[in-house]
Image (tube, rainbow, N blue to C red):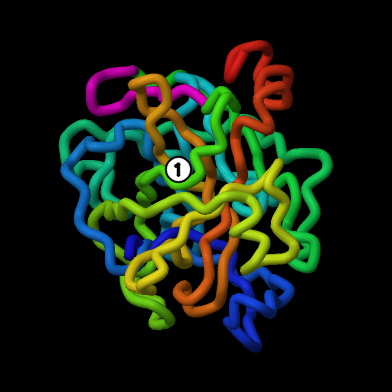
């Protein structure tokens, strides 16, 4: 699976018939995925924070406008972030020659975000305004937000990120990874996660338990096809501790089109 930056659920039991409350245990990676072709996902960003040893990847993010980035609310509870666009190698600013590094000027968390796993971490979405626009190229490109005309159930979509590459061991991906997995219907997701809400969540699940999101993938994109084009249908939000055995849960971006539009100055998803 691709190791995603997921907010993980501490599971006492992974039985589909007995969903357990989710507790945050954020991390940065995708499990058992394959290495993405460089710039296969030009809308994929690395969100970074500065620590004792310099800047480092903390979450994924999505380039929804040259100046406005979408990510998970749980990724950005403070100031002092930057993004890398056009990247392939984790934490590298010159791995492909197409990277652009831009500081974040403003963080807008959804005002109704609730960091409570028992209710499914509702409204886990945020906008980041960049200090200067990303220069758009074939290697650094925006992606539209899903329209809401379909729920994507039973469609195969692609998840991508620099999260953990194997379940439970905390080993991050060096290069961007991807996995193609089927979308569950809202009812099917609730069979696993009672606290999921079909209006605000979209779930992806490999029932063979070989692939999925993991720590380090949070905030990154679920890329689906709509009307013949790629759209961002979800933003990585939460899942189960160990990354496998339960669906990975994403913020359903189409549900937040009005919020994204109004908070980006009529720029994103308008």
Q: State yes or no: residue 139 in magenta.
A: yes
Q: Quadrant of residue 170?
A: bottom left
Q: Horizontally, is 236 left or right of 137 in the view?
A: right
Q: Going 39% across and 82% down the picture, which residue do you hit? A: 169
Q: How many marks?
A: 1
Residue 252, percent from left and from top? 61, 41
The correct choice, above or below, for 146 with respect to 87 in the image is above
Q: Going 47% across and 66% down the picture, which residue do you hit? A: 215
Q: Residues within 10 Å of mark 1 (few under 14, many from 20)?
A: many
Q: Which residue is mark 1?
A: 221
Q: Secondary structure at mark 1?
A: strand
Residue 230, percent from left and from top? 37, 28
Residue 6, percent from left and from top? 52, 61
Q: State yes or no: residue 197 in magenta.
A: no
* Magenta extent: 136-145
Q: Main secondary structure of the magenta part?
A: loop
The correct choice, above or below, for 181 with respect to 261 in the image is below
198 and 53: which is toward the camera: 198
Q: Horizontally, is 126 left or right of 137 in the view?
A: right
Q: Horizontally, is 89 left or right of 136 in the view?
A: left
151 and 176: which is toward the camera: 151
Regarding residue 130, the answer to whether it shows in the image is no
Regarding residue 40, the answer to whether it shows in the image is yes
Q: Going 75% across and 51% down the picture, which residue do you hit? A: 122
Q: Going 62% across and 13% down the picture, which residue do you hit? A: 270
Q: Horizontally, is 72 left or right of 141 in the view?
A: right
């Amino acid at each position: 699976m691709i190791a995603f930056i997921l907010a993980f659920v501490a599971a006492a039991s992974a039985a589909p018939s007995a969903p357990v409350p989710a507790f945050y245990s954020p991390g940065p990676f995708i499990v058992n995925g394959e290495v993405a072709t460089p710039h296969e996902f030009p809308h994929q960003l690395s969100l970074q924070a500065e620590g004792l040893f310099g800047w480092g990847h903390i979450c994924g993010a999505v380039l929804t406008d040259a100046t406005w980035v979408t990510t998970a609310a749980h990724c950005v509870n403070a100031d002092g972030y930057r993004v890398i666009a056009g990247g392939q190698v984790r934490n590298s600013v010159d791995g492909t020659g197409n990277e652009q590094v831009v500081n974040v000027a403003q963080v807008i968390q959804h005002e109704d975000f609730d960091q409570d796993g028992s209710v499914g971490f509702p409204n886990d979405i945020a906008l980041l305004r960049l200090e200067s626009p990303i220069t758009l190229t074939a290697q650094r490109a925006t992606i539209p937000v899903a329209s809401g005309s379909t729920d994507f159930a039973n469609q195969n979509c692609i998840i991508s990120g620099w999260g953990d590459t194997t379940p439970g061991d905390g080993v991050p991906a060096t290069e961007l990874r991807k996995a193609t997995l089927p979308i569950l219907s809202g009812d099917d997701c609730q069979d696993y996660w009672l606290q999921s809400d079909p209006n605000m969540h979209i779930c992806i699940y490999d029932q063979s338990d070989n692939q999925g999101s993991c720590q380090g993938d949070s905030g990154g994109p679920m890329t689906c096809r709509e009307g013949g084009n790629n759209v961002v249908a979800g933003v990585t939000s939460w899942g189960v501790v160990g990354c496998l055995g339960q669906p990975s849960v994403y913020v359903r971006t189409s549900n937040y089109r009005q919020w994204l539009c109004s908070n980006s100055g009529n720029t994103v998803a308008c």
